[in-house]
Image (cartoon, rainbow, N blue to C red):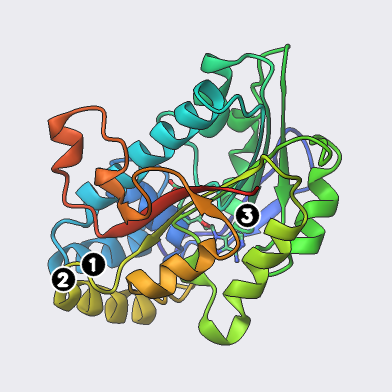
Amino acid sequence: MAGEEDEAASAGGGRPVPFDTSVAHVARVYNYWLGGKDNFAADRAAGEQAIKAFPNIPLSARANRAFLARAVRFLAGEMGIRQFLDIGTGIPSASNTHEVAQWVAPDSRIVYVDNDPVVLTHARALLTSNPAGATDYIDADLRNPRQILAGAERTLDFGRPVAVMLMAILQHVADDEDPYQVVATLRDALPPGSYLALSHPASDIDAEAMAKMAAILNQMMAEKVTFRDRDAVARFFDGLELVEPGMVQASKWRPASEAEASSPAALWAGVALKR
Ligand SMILES: C[S@@+](CC[C@H](N)C(=O)[O-])C[C@H]1O[C@@H](n2cnc3c(N)ncnc32)[C@H](O)[C@@H]1O
């Protein structure tokens, strides 16, 4: 469908959102890797080139979704967290944050944030809260964390613990855009007892293939990527206390089965507590 007329859609009858289908966008490329149908020819072309460079990228994307679900289940179930701020939501997929959290605790409150208009057009699917809880969607950019925090206050009480989720998004904040300050601003707004759950594509797992894939995505995709090594990703958790097993390959974070644990995920992942 690339080159076809741009589409206009609206979230829940809101303002129309034009979006460009002629250039690949990460939300739709990721949807393609996950086997979804919400993508266009330009997204599929970029997705396929990336697969040639790093054949495990579809499995890696699935392992990331599995980590997301395990992290939310852990936070809602074992840690009693009832508020989630999920930044870089993506096109709805299996086991979205509010579905997992409200399955464990129906009164969970979730705020989703993304800056891609195509994700906004899917917001309705994310706003299907259990009546005991709440969901909201904010069309905003991670690089403006104060705007996100101000919008999230509509739904979340920052006097009580909140889990901030930054799943496979920080690779789109370049080093010269100060990604560590962005995370610090979010962290500093959280009360004690809050958590940061984060995953990040690794430059030091399958390093050669990942470098090739990064070069291709940076040529073909609107959002640029910076993959980071273990130490650079670990710095995002500064000032926080990683829960067991620490920051590990995404598939190795509390896997539910042998199959999950052996998935070839090229991402670092962890969950950390703010004391
Ligand atoms: C690779 S997807 C990950 C989706 C989901 N978090 C997951 O882990 O399954 C990255 C998402 O982050 C969004 N994104 C990228 N840069 C962003 C930014 N600066 N602000 C807000 N969202 C952003 C993209 O639109 C996309 O939906």
The answer to whether 173 is drawn above or below residue 58 in the figure is: below
Q: Which residue is mark 2?
A: 53
Calculate the distance from the C-alpha at mark 3 to the C-alpha at mark 2: 28 Å
What x and y, as percent, mark residue 244?
38, 43
Mark 2 nearby-residue class (10 Å; few <14, some 14–19, many ≥20): some
Q: Is residue 248 left or right of residue 91?
A: left
Mark 3 nearby-residue class (10 Å; few <14, some 14–19, many ≥20): many
Identify residue type, mark 3: Pro
Calculate the distance from the C-alpha at mark 3 to the C-alpha at mark 1: 23 Å
Q: Which badge, 3 or 1, comes first in the chain's sequence? A: 1
Q: Which residue is mark 3?
A: 117
What x and y, as percent, mark residue 21?
48, 61
Of helix, strand and loop, which one carries label 3? Answer: helix
The answer to whether 13 is drawn above or below residue 209 in the figure is: above
Q: Residue at x 46, y 27 (%)?
A: 73
Q: Which residue is mark 1?
A: 50
Between label 3 and label 1, give the one nearer the viewer.
1
Whether residue 142 is visible, yes or no, is: yes
Q: Residue at x 13, y 60 (%)?
A: 55
Identify residue type, mark 1: Ala
What x and y, as percent, mark residue 40?
39, 55
Where is residue 178, by image quadrant?
bottom right
Tell whether label 2 touches label 1 (CB within 8 Å): yes
Tell whether label 1 touches label 3 (CB within 8 Å): no
Of 170 and 141, the residue lying toward us: 170
